[in-house]
Image (tube, rainbow, N blue to C red):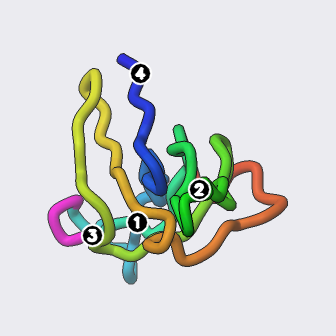
């Protein structure tokens, strides 16, 4: 299934971090924090200001930093994604091909 976000919304997939160990103890999935890194999957057409459409600063394939509780979680074809507004994106990790394991 393909999804095209509308206006200033961005479809991202959280990048799962490697297994966390603290002092040799493995942290269970239920106790882990949500990853703040994500890969951009699709972007909307842009935000509208004064009747003009301004394109978004991010593009598919970019790695971005998002807030822990940003956006709306959705499930497509068994995969979990997030739809966020462009203003919920904290930054773009430039020059990065992989942040963890995408």
Residue at image point 48% right, 73% down = 87
Question: Which residue is identified by label 2?
Answer: 100
Q: Quadrant of residue 67?
A: bottom left
- Tell me the quadrant of the picture where the N terminus can be found: top left
In the image, farthest residue toward the bottom: 23
Q: Earlier in the sequence, mark 4 or mark 2?
A: 4
Residue at image point 55% right, 59% down = 51
Question: Which residue is identified by label 1?
Answer: 35
Q: CA distance from mark 3 to mark 1?
A: 9 Å
User: Disc 4 or disc 2, which is closer to the eye?
Assistant: 4
Q: Residues within 10 Å of mark 2 (few under 14, many from 20)?
A: few
Residue at image point 68% right, 61% down = 57
Does 79 sit left or right of 54 as displayed?
Answer: left
Q: CA distance from mark 3 to mark 2?
A: 15 Å
Question: Which residue is identified by label 3?
Answer: 32
Q: SS of the residue at dot 1?
A: loop
Q: Nearer the viewer, residue 27 or 68?
A: 68
Q: Are marks 1 and 2 in contact (CB under 8 Å)?
A: yes
Q: Are marks 4 and 2 in contact (CB under 8 Å)?
A: no
Does 87 sit left or right of 80 as displayed?
Answer: right
Question: Which residue is identified by label 4?
Answer: 2
Q: Residues within 10 Å of mark 3 (few under 14, many from 20)?
A: few
Q: SS of the residue at dot 3?
A: loop
Measured from the top left, where is residue 39 in percent x and y? 55, 50
User: Disc 4 or disc 3, which is closer to the eye?
Assistant: 4
């Amino acid at each position: 299934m393909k999804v095209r976000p509308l206006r200033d919304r961005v479809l991202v997939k959280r990048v799962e971090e490697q297994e966390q160990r603290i002092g040799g103890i493995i942290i269970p999935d239920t106790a882990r924090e949500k990853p703040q890194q994500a890969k951009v999957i699709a972007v909307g057409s842009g935000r509208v200001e004064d009747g003009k459409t301004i394109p978004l600063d991010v593009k598919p394939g970019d790695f971005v930093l998002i807030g822990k509780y940003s956006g709306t979680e959705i499930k497509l074809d068994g995969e979990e994604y997030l739809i966020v507004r462009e203003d919920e994106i904290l930054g773009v990790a430039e020059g990065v091909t992989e942040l963890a394991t995408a």
